[in-house]
Image (spheres, grey):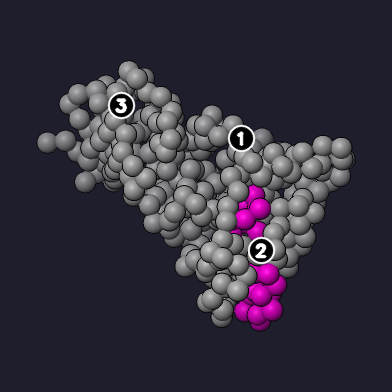
Amino acid sequence: MNVIFKSSAPGSLMLLGEYAVLHGQHALVSAIDKRMTVILTPRSDKKILLDSALGQHETTLAHLKLVAPFRFVLATIKAVKKYLTHGFHLKIESEFSDTVGFASSAAVTVATLSALSTWCGLSLSESDFIKLARRIVRHVQGTGSGADVAACVMGGVVLYRMKPFIAEKFSCTHPITVVYSGSKTPTVEAIARVKKQFANFPQLFNQIFKTMNQCTLDGVKALRENDWRKLGAIFNIQQGLMESLGVSTAPIHEIINTLRQQSTILGAKISGSGLGDCVVALGASSVSDFSQAGLGVKNMSVKMSAEGVRCEKI
């Protein structure tokens, strides 16, 4: 009887340093309690069957091609193909939608890589696992820092830098409020728009990133001191920097203003690439209905989580 492998990885939220982390600076990213799960059942032949709420796909080890909506999963399989001797059935289940900015691409990549590497008996250090998963994500989407990958692998709040590589975990948690702004611009598209906007202002561009980096470093210092109020103030400062990049929107602006008026909220900002996506606030909001900010705006029930990727035999 075949052993079945069940692997899951958390989604994540960027707390500080988005955009800057793509330019060699630090970022702070948190795992959340919503998870992506894959269940791998080995087969005796070479067929690969993928099954999720987004659809189904059938292929073989010899004919792997990256096709939507399974590009990240198929790229992960290709990355370890030389270790695979048989096919398998992979069922993918998610506690969050891929249209919400919880790093679903990183989560499904990490969960799939965990299941495959466990099945194949690959022994990867945590840093090597992060770097391999990061390489897979970048291969598919053409860009990406890997900060979300690090949070998916390690759990908790992670201080991250691409090069020189840093991934340091903090297991501390704090109540957060997450509000979806009603729309999401693909990360690659948002990055391209910001780059184009600042094409004639490279020094200003770099200065914004350096200031974002200082926000992240000051944020880490606040974490080490358990000073959540100071971290919230840094959230507000970085939101101003995000606005200077032109990635805020009218719904985001209204959501943030509503949140900041509450005494329980220590700070609020865009999480991720902006131009839609989510707002993350430090503290628990007393407002449950943000619909007045725009169509599709909704409060997401999300918590920070100290748990990273896990894989078990069932």
**Separation of marks 3 and 1 at Cα, in angstroms:** 27 Å
Q: Mark 2 or mark 1, which has the lower sequence index?
A: 1
Which residue is nearer to you in this view: 12 or 297?
Answer: 297
SS assignment at label 2: helix
Other residues around mark 3 within 10 Å, as few (<14) / some (14–19) / many (≥20):
some
- Residue type indicated by callout 1: Thr
Residue behind mark 1: 143
Q: Is residue 285 above or below residue 269?
A: below
Residue behind mark 2: 252
Q: Mark 3 or mark 1, which has the lower sequence index?
A: 3
Mark linked to residue 59 = 3
- Assign the N terminus to one quadrant of the image: top left
Which residue is nearer to you in this view: 70 or 215?
Answer: 70
Q: At which x and y percent is residue 155?
A: 48, 52
Highlighted magenta segment, given as a residue range = 254-278
Residue 51's quadrant in the figure? top left
